[in-house]
Amino acid sequence: MAFSEILDQVGSLGRFQVLQTVALVVPIMWLTTHNMLENFSAAVPSHRCWVPLLDNSTAQASVPGALGPEALLAVSIPLGPDHEPHQCRRFRHPQWQLLDPNTTATNWSEAATEPCVDGWVYDYSTFTSTIVAKWDLVCDSQALKPMAQSIFLAGILVGAAVCGQTSDRFGRKLVLTWSYLQLAVWGTATAFAPTFPVYCLFRFLAAFAIAGIMMNTSTLLVEWTSAQARALAMTFNALGFSFGQILLAAVAYGVRDWTLLQLAVSVPFFLCFVYSWWLAESARWLLVTGRLERGLQELQRVAAINGKRAVGDTLTTEVLLSAMQEELSVKQAPASLGTLFYTPGLGLRTCVSIPCWFAFGFTFFGLALDLQALGSNIFLLLVLLGAFDIPAKISTLLLLSRLGRRPMQASSLVLAGLCILANTLVPLEMGALRAALALLGLCGVGAAFICITIYTGELFPTVLRMTAVGLGQMSARAGGILGPLVRLLGVHSPSLPLLMYGAVPVLSGLAALLLPETQNLPLPDTIQDVQNQAVKKATHGTWERSVLKSTQF
């Protein structure tokens, strides 16, 4: 693989790689805030029906005697199943008899009540404004909140489908820069959405850009580093998501209005758009696609930044043509999904990596996008989720370099699934243990995310890498869309969602054992490179078996 040698000459782990990693990972932190944003912007505050005796000063003046708010609430709002004021119904007329100590407050008929025809009153003690309170996404309209969440994840799925092939055709940097601008514009516009359908549309468009940012960030990090430094760069990328969770908790704690919070996490991408013009296009992609002049310019620029200007000056198009002769002489396959599935050497890799991506999205988003169900302090929960995720990912980096990609991919998914499955055996009363197992499971899923991101970049050739990453992102988002919906199965059995959240990663982890090991191998640039790797592995295995047989005689 000639490009690996060229990259080593100009510097595969130098000042340029450090600056590039920082420039790419900082936006990932802010991007994570969009992924988890609706834990706060769409938080459901405590609410009850609007009633005249409590919320109309004229009606209050006609109340006989000096009755306090609690008494007026008792005669206006029936008690719900949790013995708190009902959130979706009110009495048609004040039930003064309930003030009698001998009357049971729960003894009321459905006919004596009506829905909240005059709207709701919300508790603004935690959040001064949310989209739930703005558009009354409660009671009969409560399904609209998860619908908005699914629309957002669908936007990432569609973006992954489009941006993968677009990046393989037009370049990584161009699509990344455009995605920064798109997220800045549509994220900002979301804060001023006049209606809920428009809000969902803007969130969909912002999510489309998020897919482009995630895929092109990881690909640029992979294609500008050597095999030894690749795991380090991708771990920093994954840590950006962990720090992003902590960042969101901090920002949301200080900004309790959903409009201002939406602006706070969107406006920084205008700055990302401006400085993204400094980023270097992938020289590997430029050379493989025949853009030798631009590839030479990028390599010379990287050499200068890394303090190897003399090496850069020795590079010419003739040198690149000679070094990349094999790659450039091979007829490049079109970047299509059919190529990934039907080409010998790629079909198995594609069919096994897709479930690994799906398992990550299915389990992570199924558990992490419902923080209110895990506890009352969602700020602390998100901080703990990010804090626990950091050492898990650092440990994964260390183990990836020692154990290899395949065993780490399999073990991280299987262990995550087992922790979640173990929760089905823990009684509900043991909340601390259940929380600990859930955190361990999410940490395992986070480790699996690092593995599959690095693994996918190394399994597929440069001419198809973004298409493969896009397909993986689509699989992850499809899992993310289905994950929250699985919680609806809890009405049949509380353990059923956990069984599915645990079984999917276990089965995907076992399937990952079918993938080839890529540790310390140079990145394949063409389909022929992938097939040559398979031939070398088969030849090496045959040689080992022949040696073993000869030693037996």
Image (spheres, rainbow, N blue to C red):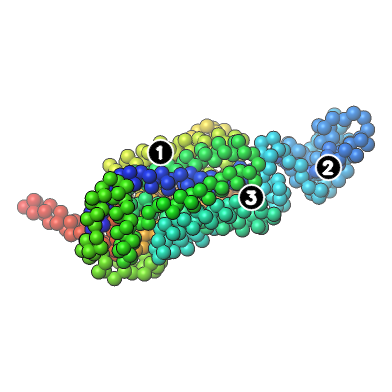
Rendered location of residue 420, percent (x, y) = 47, 42
Q: Position of residue 332 (x, y in %)?
A: 31, 69
What separation in Å lies between label 1 and label 2 (alpha carbons)? 51 Å
Position of 137 relative to 246 (above/below)? below
* Residue at x 50%, y 33% (from the top left corner): 433
Residue at numbered disc 3 = 191
Query: For the point 66% across and 54% down, which residue is it?
Result: 193
Please tell me which residue lies in front, 265 or 23. Answer: 23
Residue depth check, mark 3 versus mark 1: number of the one nearer the observer: 3
Most foreground residue, 427 or 292: 292
Label 1: how many Cα within 10 Å (few below 14, some 14–19, many 20+): some
Q: Are marks 3 and 2 in contact (CB under 8 Å)?
A: no
Position of 77 with respect to 553 (left or right) is right
Residue sitting at the far left:
553
Which three-letter amino acid code belongs to the residue tagged 1? Ala
- Whether residue 520 is visible here, answered yes or no, is no
Describe residue 137's horizontal placement relative to residue 494 as left or right: right
Which image quarter: residue 229?
A: top left
Kindly identify which residue carries mark 2.
Answer: 51
Which comes sooner in the sequence, label 3 or label 1? Answer: 3
In which quadrant will I find the N terminus?
bottom left
Q: Residue at x 32, y 39 (%)?
A: 398
Using the image, tell me which numbered label, if any, was put on residue 392. 1
Q: Residues within 10 Å of mark 2 (few under 14, many from 20)?
A: many
Q: Is residue 277 visible?
A: yes
Sequence order check, earlier mark of 3 and 2: 2
Q: Are marks 3 and 1 in contact (CB under 8 Å)?
A: no
Where does residue 189 sit, x and y in percent of width and height?
A: 62, 53
- Mark 3 and mark 1: Cα distance apart in space: 35 Å
